[in-house]
Amino acid sequence: MTITILGLGPGDPELLTRRAWRILSEAEEVYLRTERHPNVTELPIQQLHSFDAWYDAADDFASLYQRIAEEIVRLGQRPQGVVYAVPGHPLVGEQTVTLILQLARAQGVPVQVVDGLSFIEPLIGALGIDALDGLQLHDAETIAHMHHPPLNPDVPALLAQVYSSAIASDVKLTLANQYPETHEVTLVYSAGTPEQRLERVPLYALDRQPVDHLTSLYVPPLQRRGSFEYFQEIMAHLRSPEGCPWDRRQTHESLRSYLLEETYEVLEALDSGDLELLKRELGDLLLQIVFHAQIAVEAGEFSMADVIAYTCQKLIRRHPHVWGDVQVDDPAQVHANWDQIKRQERATEGSAAQPSALDGVPKTLPALAAATALHARAARTGFEWDCLEDVIAKVREELEELVSADGAEQRREEFGDVLSSLVNLARWYDLDPEAALRESNAKFVRRFQYIEQRAAQQGRALQSLSPSEIDELWRAAKADGL
């Protein structure tokens, strides 16, 4: 009673190992996962069985592979055992082998694995690359079902089993989330067989090429290093004894002002619409996050992996309509679910028995942004006006109370109420009041500087202009589109 799992190599009969050849010669019968392998006709097999017929009847590969594994384990329990042969190496891209090992271990059936040359060795030979130079190996079908490739773009990658045009198309879309569409990739056909050949194409043309079950894809690294791992290496180097004295001296506390400054610079880039500037400023903001994470690593507090893992788990947990069976019809339901899940999280964490819907708005937020968040959270609980007209009426009411306020203390209070009511009006108009005010500030600067320049052209100081002259120049600035 034993299961012998044998690797048939990549396809050329000369690449079959001597041990595999001997076992095949001595076996009375051999079971193949598939006869669709270039060297099957050359093998010294007395009696051959394959599972190819099962492929046609299978609903999906997962159930098919489970069925094959169960059958091999059953056959292996016979006195004569079973010889099961698969393409390449038994433990490179062979899901049935993994399942067989699990089932056999659970049922106490001994297994011996006869190594075979995988597709990887002839593939790296054809490409002329060193596998130890960071080469990443993935199943193309796995990549095809993702939205972002799990690849470090600084090192090369091999994607095996690009067996259909549909897989090639989905792989292209996934890779395009990280690699430029003109990035040159290489299709490797029939590696390890006499028909082996390479074809280099830009990524956008990947799904325009013929592919089959013996097709693999090589993705070279990007020309400029841009991985998150490289970013962390640079920061760790800067903080090391061989690094920068200024960077080594920083703490969580000393970096506070830089984090705030970089955040506002990102907002300014967003307002400008300058995408090149936005790219640079996002990098500067990310630098602050990586900086804090490295300081935490050195203090034994947490790592960047901890930060990312926590955020990933939270996103999945708070989107049960994406990673679960919850149904939603509109964004309002998404918000409601989000708030409910947050309350459950606080209860689990041992927070107050009756948490407020307004919990979690940072006290350090600028007042306008904080007011926006508070009004939005309150509205999601049903604390809301019936219609827009009521909101506008509230603004007028608060403005009248400001005008009639008696004394500085009351005016300050009423002025705050006016601002709060305007923030709520902005929410009803689906406007970001912070962004609107920044844009208004920028517009004021442009028009004011226009007046300064016109006054200077007339050889006059701004203070010498009369109110009517200033108003005239202001209107001219508006007419010029400023």
Image: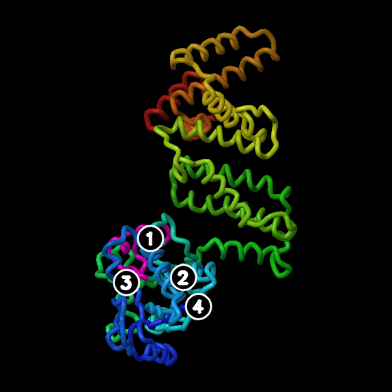
Q: Amino acid at mark 3?
A: Phe
Give the residues drawn in magenta, as a range.
161-185
Label count reads 4
Q: Amino acid at mark 4?
A: Val
Please, which residue is most extreme toward the front here?
79
At x 48%, y 74%, the residue is 135
Would you name the residue on which mark 1 appears?
Answer: 63
Bin the neighbour count of mark 2 within 10 Å (Cα to Cα): few under 14, some 14-19, many 20 and up.
many
At x 67%, y 53%, the residue is 292
Would you name the residue on which mark 4 appears?
Answer: 111
Identify whether 352 is placed above or below 318: above
User: Cα distance, mark 2 to mark 4?
Assistant: 9 Å
Front in this rendered view, residue 456 or 412 = 412
Mark 2: which secondary structure?
helix
Would you name the residue on which mark 3 appears?
Answer: 51
Mark 3 and mark 4 in contact (Cβ < 8 Å)? no
Front in this rendered view, residue 28 or 17 = 28
Would you name the residue on which mark 2 appears?
Answer: 100
Depth check, mark 4 against mark 1: the one in front is 4
Mark 4 and mark 2 in contact (Cβ < 8 Å)? yes
Q: Quadrant of residue 405?
A: top right
User: Cα distance, mark 4 to mark 1?
Assistant: 22 Å
Ranked by sequence position, the earlier of labels 3 and 2 is: 3
Position of 280 with respect to 288 (left or right) is left
Front in this rendered view, residue 420 or 193 = 193
At x 52%, y 23%, the residue is 379
Position of 42 with respect to 306 (left or right) is left
